[in-house]
Image (cartoon, grey):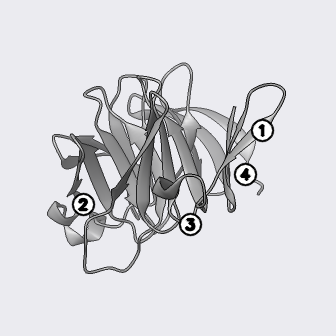
Amino acid sequence: LWCGTTHGLARFDGVNFKVFNAQNTPELGSARIRQLFVDRHGVLWIAVFEGALVRFKDGVFSAFTLPPRESTARTILLITDDDSGALWVTVEDGAVLRFANGQFELISDKWSPATRTVFQVHGDAQGRPWVTTPLSLALIERGKLVPQLQGTKLGQYEFLCPSRSGGWWIQTGGRVKLWREGQWIADAGEWAR
């Protein structure tokens, strides 16, 4: 079991915790952990608040730093992977980057200005990355956004999680709904935070 904290990364073996921090694992930088993600191959990915993406594979930590951009936003908010093994990350300013073969590529700068800000990125069971933008729920295909559900007001859609039966549980209009194959399938009721 892995736990990310603002004081390091902790691994619980069932009896004891082992803490990885800036002193014993320099690849973690400050070791202020923001996000943990396990990819399709069982590799642990760690997002550090200061903008590093750290891989833990075969007992070795390796750090990858976000490329320089105009924005000073560095914190990775969400990570997912696709069926090719590439990672997709959302940064706090809404940028989306693809990470493959040890390199980051800024993807969202190629999209229209209205869709460049992404709130969340998630992968579905088929290994396809999806995003919520200020006005839509969209699939990313070959680096391009393909809107699947178009809203009428800012922040109308927020991912909650993929459904085991396919589709997405989404918060919209103060309610939690299941959206699948182009239509609303179920309404689970009011959204209360």
Outermost residue, top direction? 165
The label nearer to you, 3 versus 2, is 3
Could you tell me the amino acid type at mark 1?
A: Phe
Tags 3 and 4 touching, CB below 8 Å: no
The secondary element bearing badge 2 is classed as helix
Could you tell me the amino acid type at mark 3?
A: Ser
Q: Position of residue 88 (x, y in %)?
A: 34, 46
Up/down of 72 relative to 165, above or below: below
Horizontal placement of 119 versus 188: left or right?
left
Residue identified by numbered label 4: 191
Question: Mark 2 Cα within 10 Å, few/some/many (few <14, many 20+)?
Answer: many
Front residue of 126/137: it is 126
Q: Could you tell me how far apart the alpha carbons at marks 3 and 1 are, in whole angstroms?
A: 19 Å
Could you tell me the amino acid type at mark 4?
A: Trp
Q: Could you tell me how far apart the alpha carbons at marks 4 and 1 are, in whole angstroms?
A: 35 Å
Question: Mark 3 Cα within 10 Å, few/some/many (few <14, many 20+)?
Answer: some
Q: Could you tell me how far apart the alpha carbons at marks 2 and 1 are, in whole angstroms?
A: 39 Å
Horizontal placement of 129 versus 144: left or right?
right
Front residue of 42/76: it is 42
Compare marks 3 and 2 and give the one earlier in the sequence. 3
Compare marks 2 and 4 and give the one earlier in the sequence. 2
Give me the residue at 48% from left, 69% from top: 50
Q: Quadrant of the N terminus?
A: top right
Give me the residue at 20% from left, 66% from top: 109
Up/down of 113 relative to 140, above or below: below
Q: Could you tell me how far apart the alpha carbons at marks 2 and 4 are, in whole angstroms?
A: 29 Å
Up/down of 1 relative to 166, above or below: below
Point out which mark residue 108 bears.
2
Point out which mark residue 17 bears.
1
Q: Quadrant of the C terminus?
A: bottom right
Compare marks 4 and 1 and give the one earlier in the sequence. 1
